[in-house]
Image (spheres, coloured by chain):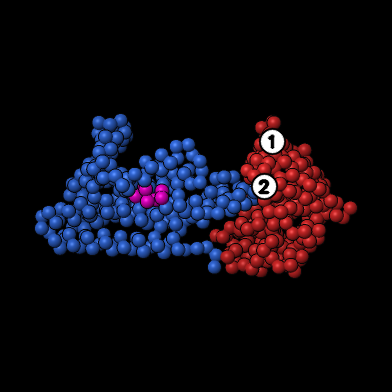
Amino acid sequence: MGSEALHVDVGLSLGRFALDVALEVPPGITVLFGPSGSGKSTTLAAIAGLVRPVRGRVAFDGTTWFDAERHVDVPPERRRVSLVFQSLALFPHLTTEDNVAYGIDPGIRGRARERRALAGMERMKVAHVARRRPGTLSGGEAQRVALARALARDPCVLLLDEAFSALDAELRAELGAEVRSVVSELSIPAIVVTHDRSEARSLGERIVSLRDGRVLATDDVRG
Amino acid sequence: MSFAPLFLSLEVASIAVVIAGACGIGIAALLAGRKLPGGELLDGIITAPMVLPPTVLGYYVLVLCGRQSTIGRAFESLTGAPIVFSVTGAILAATIGALPLVVLSARAALEGVDPTLVRAARTLGATPLRAFVTVELPIALPAIAAGLVLGFARALGDFGVTLMVAGDIPGRTQTASLAIYDAISSGREREAAFMSGVLTLVGVLAVYTARRLTRRRHGI
């Protein structure tokens, strides 16, 4: 991974109001902070290619993923954006190992694929639950598996949508520290969505406050 | 007493459920949660056989697939045998009976899959087809299997459409339900009772299996 920034400038209608967000996301963690329904998750979905904005542009490292004017709309599977959903969205019919392996490039097969899945599980400390299905995992384990799966994709951009909201404070802090370390190691832009102010301050290097679909303020926490 | 009608019914229902399964899952995938133009009309046409009289369905099949029809002539020139008044006709009749059950079950099962899982698969590099095959289909499979089991039982017991399309030719197109009618008409009550018993057993087993399958959940 390099040290490229994610460029986001998108607009779309959310029913109650219009989302109109412009962000420049450098490598490191940027927290998207705001109340429920302020457009945080929709912004992530637009970056991942899961919703189509009516205007604007999404680009990373000189590659345009979306450009309304030029009718460019790269599908999610070709964007290399990993999104950890609030519900985690672990595949219930697959084991931890198969969940993690799902994101690995299909071109990598056999033993190499197994080794990669194992390395991903070890990085997030879930190798001991490799053969178990999501329904049997604790909240913390499931969270770690979701992160391991997202990272196995070898993403250019990592997005976490209220991914820690179901965990207790201690576990949240522990996983937050791990995410910070992984993002710093990979040197990729990461956006963490939260409506928890203390989580926003402890996790982010930058905090972007969103309300009614618009950026209210951008604070450089570590700067 | 001849077991041939029972074996023929099993053969016809097995082939019919494979055809209904392949077509039905495909149709259900097109209809499920997607705004397909004319989707509801297609759904109506597919599920109408559940409420239409067998004579009406039989009439349509005879018109569409009879020996003088375009489809019927094309089939006969390719295979050398007609669709109607043959085992092919019986399979077609059984498929028409099974298809709505398969489509209804498969559609409900696919629509029951959490859309976030499909979105997650897409962000993990899966094309829509790969997401369908590796995520939606396996999760929906128990409920789809339940629809296939019910479809099999429905195909096994078809009477009206089979009679009109395949006829009641002993040793050729006489399925178990036709043979039961024949046995009662000619006073062979033990034969009728035996075959009715077998069809009832299969029907009860099918409903029981379908219920067990739809209750199955992944995870714990």
- Tell me which residue sits at (43%, 41%) in the image: B40
Tell me if residue A185 can be seen.
Answer: no
Q: Nearer the viewer, residue A20 or A92?
A: A20
Indicate the quadrant where residue B57 lies: top left
For badge 2, the amino acid type reads Thr
- Tell me which residue sits at (75%, 51%) in the image: A32
State whether residue A66 is above or below residue B5. above
Per the model, the C-alpha gap separating discs 2 and 1 is 14 Å
> Where does the magenta region start and end?
B98-104
Q: Secondary structure at mark 1?
A: strand
| 10 Å crowding of disc 1: few (<14), some (14-19), many (20+) | some
- Of all chains, the one bearing label 1 is A
Q: Which chain is red?
A: A
Which tint is chain B? Answer: blue
Image location (x, y in percent) of residue B91:
30, 46
Seen from this angle, which residue lies furthest left?
Answer: B187
Q: Secondary structure at mark 2?
A: helix
Q: Nearer the viewer, residue A159 or A221?
A: A221
| Secondary structure mostly taken by the magenta-highlighted segment of the chain | helix
Image location (x, y in percent) of residue B168:
19, 47
Image location (x, y in percent) of residue B46:
37, 43
Describe residue A216's horizontal placement relative to residue B154 as left or right: right
- Disc ID at residue A42: 2
| 10 Å crowding of disc 2: few (<14), some (14-19), many (20+) | many
- Disc ID at residue B201: none
For badge 1, the amino acid type reads Arg
Task: Report which residue position mark 1 lands on.
Answer: A55
Describe residue B26's horizontal placement relative to residue B59 as left or right: right
